[in-house]
Image (tube, grey):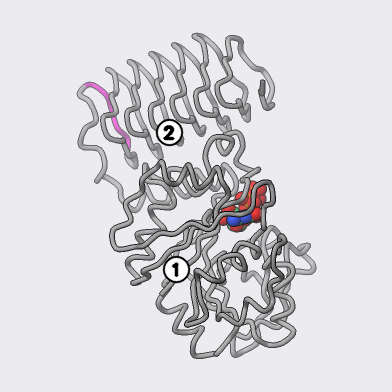
Amino acid sequence: MKAIVLAGGFATRLRPLSCTRPKALFPVVNKPLLEWTFERLEKHNIRDVIMAVNHQTEIAVKEQKIPTHTLRVMYSRDPPRKPLGTGGPIKKAEKLIGHDSSFLVLNGDIFADVNYTRLLETHRKTRATATIALCKVDDPSRFGVAELAKDNCIRRFFEKPSPEEAPSKLINAGVYAFHPEIFEYMPENRAVSTEREVFPKLAKEKKLYGYIHSDLWMDIGKPEEYLEINRILLNRTKGTQNQQASRGSQVREPVAIGKAAVIGKRSVIGPNTVLGHDTVVGDDVRIQDSVVFDGAEIDDSTRIQGAIIGGHVKIGKRVSIPKACILGDYVKIRDDVSLAEGVTVCPAKEISESVATARNICC
Ligand code: GTP
């Protein structure tokens, strides 16, 4: 059984963190999102995984050396400077996927505990060309929304409808089972949007079905969603991750502390906080509701709340980083700097003065 993972997008909504890493490699409780996906695929006996990537993503994924265990991982690359969208990469991988059996397609930027085995079973039973995992959300307007008939055949499919237009709260979860017939609906050598070009046609021909997924699902496309998935998973694994918290500091669960992290005296970490591997936290530091990526260094008496701190960032003493701040990789923040809520800083930028209003600080 084969799966294709779409991982060649630009993740514009997660800048500046996505300037230096693809979304599929964002750490989720100290493990790359893609590693969670690989583990789930393995659990459901998928053997071959095709990573649909661009050149940079391919390099980054290979460098990360994610354990693949029994999976065989192949790469299918979009042409240089010609992103193929969400459908073009599937068409491009047609030979690798083959025509023998139905296959899975996964957006590489979502965290979803979908039961792939059941999705594929449902797909085979209905003899659909495509079966979309659907999940219920309060506000469907940012997503593709399905109108379902009683037999779960999708009558119509609306991409990002206005609240009045949305026919239901069942949205495209970014996980699909496709019959090889799908290739006939995808033109070759150009960008294709599966959601806008392929699904509406299939719906008209009654070849599109839904599979309702009611377990955990989260798109990590936006910073607040990224923090939320970390918070949810921290709560699931509460109390199991912090053997090496240093003496003299305090950990307020739920917290995850990476390998070789060092925490100074009287510092308070948590709740809802992830400290990456090899992070160094000084004395009297307070970090809560935040994710700190690997290798970051945070000096004494600094306060971080509700923020995302990129890899290898260096933060000085008595710094204040409040809610919705995002620091790109390798950012440096000098002593005594205070940032306003919602300040984002591009990778490797140095900040030596306080910032009073929310804005993006770039080169
Ligand atoms: P935003 O710019 O923040 O919307 O992110 P995105 O374009 O990366 O995400 P989107 O939700 O549009 O894409 C869904 C999935 O398809 C993601 O896993 C992307 O990585 C992937 N994807 C999007 N565009 C391409 C593309 O041109 N080529 C490939 N190979 N994958 C893509």
- Magenta residue check for 251: yes
Disc 1: which residue: 114
> Which disc is residue 293 wearing?
2
> Which disc is residue 84 wearing?
none
- Assign a secondary structure to mark 2: loop
Q: Residues within 10 Å of mark 2 (few under 14, many from 20)?
A: many
Q: Gap between marks 1 and 2, in whole Å?
A: 27 Å
> 212 or 124: nearer the eye?
124
Disc 1 Cβ-to-ligand 1 distance below 8 Å: no
Rendered residue at 69%/77% (across/down):
185
Residue 133 position by quadrant? bottom right
11 displayed left or right of 165:
left
> 192 or 328: nearer the eye?
192
Q: Residues within 10 Å of mark 1 (few under 14, many from 20)?
A: many
Rendered residue at 32%/28% (across/down):
278
- Assign a secondary structure to mark 1: loop
Q: Is residue 11 above or below residue 40?
A: above
